[in-house]
Image: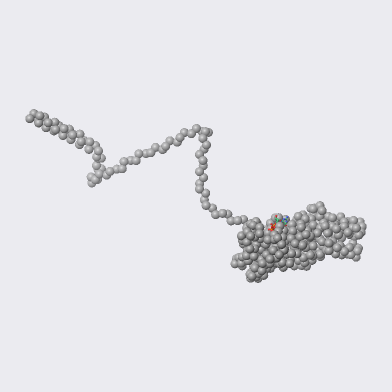
Amino acid sequence: MEYVVIAVALLVLLIVGAVAYVVPKRRRELPPSVPGTTGTEVLERPPTPAVEPEAEPEVEPGLVEPPAVVEPEPAVETPPAPVIETPEPTAGRLTRLRARLSRSQNSLGRGLLALLSRDKLDDDTWDEVEESLIRADVGVGPTQELVERLRTQARVLGTGSADELRKLLAEELTNALEPSLDRSLTATAEGRPAVVLVVGVNGSGKTTTCGKIGRVLVADGRTVMFGAADTFRAAAAEQLATWAGRVGAEVVRGPEGGDPAAVAFDAVKRGIETRVDTVVIDTAGRLQNKIGLMDELGKVKRVVERHGPVDETLLVLDATTGQNGLEQARVFTEVVNVTGVVLTKLDGTAKGGIVIAVQRKLGIPVKLVGLGEGPDDLAPFEPAQFVEALLATDA
Ligand SMILES: Nc1nc2c(ncn2[C@@H]2O[C@H](COP(=O)(O)OP(=O)(O)OP(=O)(O)O)[C@@H](O)[C@H]2O)c(=O)[nH]1
């Protein structure tokens, strides 16, 4: 019985002890009630502990490279519009030739002046005048005629001074160039683009001439389309595209080795669609034989003519090939109806007389001359100015 009483007493003590421990603890855990509220407990979000910034690693000055500067992402930019060049006006370009020819030590003008300044103009002197003109590529036939007329005039007029003789010679040379010939370039047509076909042997300067002609036309306010029908040489199309880009013109080209007639046809078609004033077509000159050349050029012309007539066919000749170039030139005149000659590289020879020979032999007017590789080194041919340049002696 005693044991039971002790056990009950212990139990009571234990319960009292437990109650005494738990109640104050719960009181501590509950927040105090907010005055003025309905008694609903508002539980506040415990404040977020402030995060301490990570300490910067200490860097000993001078030992470590400065941190790389991070460039901002580049903004996407539209490519700049191509710079379109403004070609020089054509007037006065031929005067550059005068400067170039007169600087040459073995210029025709210098040699002739020395001969015509002699005290006595005997047969030997006239023979030497003849030789000088032949050496300058004037050609045997035209030279003999020219000297004969000069001698007669000098006799009739009783002219003896070097200046007067030089003046007479200039007149004779100018007349030999037939100044009355029409040298204008047909570069416009009624209600359609004019078509200019450029032909000649390889390396004579066809592509360059196409580019220069385009520039001249653009400078005159015309619109131009180029046709790269020289499919034989891939670089020719590239070259033409560069020329076109410089004056903001379009170029139609085909695959390397493709059909040149198809390219020429497409170029004229595109020219009609875009209503340009002139379509300038470059052709290949590197053909194995005359038959091949005839076939190809003939086809180019025929196919282009399905759109309308070819208005100008320019034969490009390299002045430095002299009389040899004339034979090659004749082949072209047999294939296509050449309407004008462009004599290139006149800057590379002191023998400007080739102009007279070309006109005489081919019976076709020289319309333009190339005076260098520069974009504006192409001048309209003008006989009197040209003869002045040929006979110039001033340095
Ligand atoms: N000095 C000088 N060089 C010129 C003139 N015209 C063209 N050339 C140069 O002659 C070289 C040949 O010119 P191109 O225009 O490629 O000749 P091309 O007739 O088209 O040649 P192919 O495409 O091979 O038939 C180039 O280096 C031109 O810069 C000129 O009037 N004077």
Image point (84%, 55%), residue name: 111
Displayed quadrant of residue 50? top left
Can see residue 41? yes
Give the percent coordinates (x, y) of residue 115. 87, 56
Image quadrant where residue 162 sits: bottom right
Q: Tell me how many marks there are.
A: 0
Q: Could you tell me which residue is drawn at 53 percent across and 33 percent down?
A: 62
Above or below, 60 against 94 in this view is above
Relative to residue 66, is residue 18 drawn left or right? left
Q: At x 22% / y 38%, what residue is drawn?
A: 26
Taking depth in this image into account, of 122 and 288 the one nearest to the observer is 288
- Residue 77 location (% of width, % of height): 54, 53
Q: Residue at x 68, y 61 (%)?
A: 284
Q: Position of residue 164 (x, y in %)?
A: 87, 60
Q: Is residue 211 left or right of residue 174?
A: left
Q: In which quadrant of the rendered image does the N terminus lie?
A: top left
Image coords of residue 154 (percent x, y)? 89, 63
Furthest toward the top, the residue is 2
Image-quarter location of ligand 1: bottom right
Residue 192 picture quarter: bottom right
In front: 259, or 59?
A: 259
Classify 67 as above or below 110. above
